[in-house]
Amino acid sequence: MERLNVAVLFGGESKEYEVSLSSAYSVLLEIDKEKYNVIKIGITKDGKWYLYEGESSRILNDTWHKSKEKKELFIDVNKGLLIAEGKPLKIDKILPVLHGEYGEDGRYASIFDTIKINYSGCGFFASAISMDKDVTKLIAKREGVPVAKWTTVYKSELENMSKIYKKIEKIGYPVFVKPSRTGSSVGVSQVNSKKELEGALLYALSLCDKVLIEEKIDGRETEIALISKDGELIGSTVGQIKYKSDFYDYDTKYNSSEVEYVIPAKLTAESERLVRKYAKKLWHALEIKDLCRMDFFVNDNGEVVFNEVNTFPGFTGISMFPKLLMYDGHSFKDIINYILNI
């Protein structure tokens, strides 16, 4: 059987650039070389595209863009081609291992749709909607999926902090202040009192023009991997994340040795049923396809509260998406294969 030409995209202009490099390195190690000819395409932090033909290890240590084994890449919209040094690349499918802005938000998916190149992932619409935490919560609420109390703040509102303080009074401290359209907890702060609020807002608004202020839910952080396999939606075993910091921030996720991944999560049968029910309901409501990871809080009363959806979850060595599916008996190589053959 002829091997498919698969382009693995990595890097990008997101604050999660380094996470993308780590995820892509894991994918490049595990992808089935007998089934796929792998084409490596890197995107620098300032948005330049390159065909990279060097060692994958240079992706992991972020020296790939300094290599002589790269060629500038251009997109020919009229012909629907990716071109390096005047030669079109033969690509059967793109695997965009990109996190955060310019990846999970659907911007690159819209380019691939425009030039009619096949790609894996949630698609433009689902990615754009799911990246915005405010919009996602509105849809979840409409679907009857419980969410934390929240409000939004725009940069222009900072001129009237008294109005913002009144919004928070309806929620009650502590709250989380989050950029509405970032991932990996980038820009997130826990705010315990009124005096901490303005600094957290300024920080979040430096990353996104809309900020979410959300009630803190005391409960277990649980995650479920969802994947479409042979036309059927598969929900993994539900996992739980334990940590000693105040919340599961970027540093805790990627730099702490004190994070514990509990699979399966310590939940009642009813709470697990609700996580699965809500996850599948949101999959359809958000029009997700191919894959995602959904995160929920479960409090001591067993109540389940939706947190967020990741439209291209991490594939690093510590990422829960592959951990959960591997616990269920799927190898890392199989997971990549499912995604590429949907």
Image (cartoon, grey):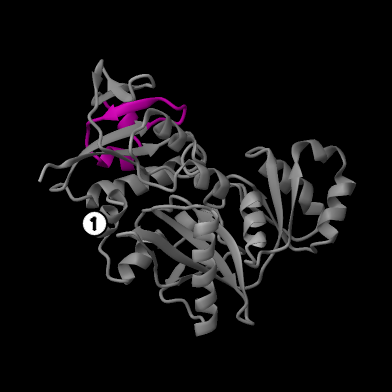
Residue 252 in sight in this render: no
State yes or no: residue 183 in magenta.
Answer: no
Q: Which residue is mark 1?
A: 333
Spot occupied by residue 329 in the image (x, y as percentages of width and height): 27, 70
**Furthest residue toward right:** 162
- 174, above or below 9, in the image: below
Horizontally, residue 78 falls left or right of residue 242, namely left
Residue 183 in sight in this render: yes
Horizontally, residue 322 falls left or right of residue 283, namely left
Residue drawn at (25%, 63%) of the image: 331
- 262, above or below 19, in the image: below
Spot occupied by residue 253 in the image (x, y as percentages of width and height): 48, 57
Spot occupied by residue 202 in the image (x, y as percentages of width and height): 72, 41
Amino acid type at image mark 1: Lys
Residue drawn at (79%, 62%) of the image: 171
Q: Which residues are magenta?
A: 43-67
Spot occupied by residue 223 in the image (x, y as percentages of width and height): 48, 66
- 233, above or below 29, in the image: below
**Furthest residue toward front:** 231
**Furthest residue toward left:** 1
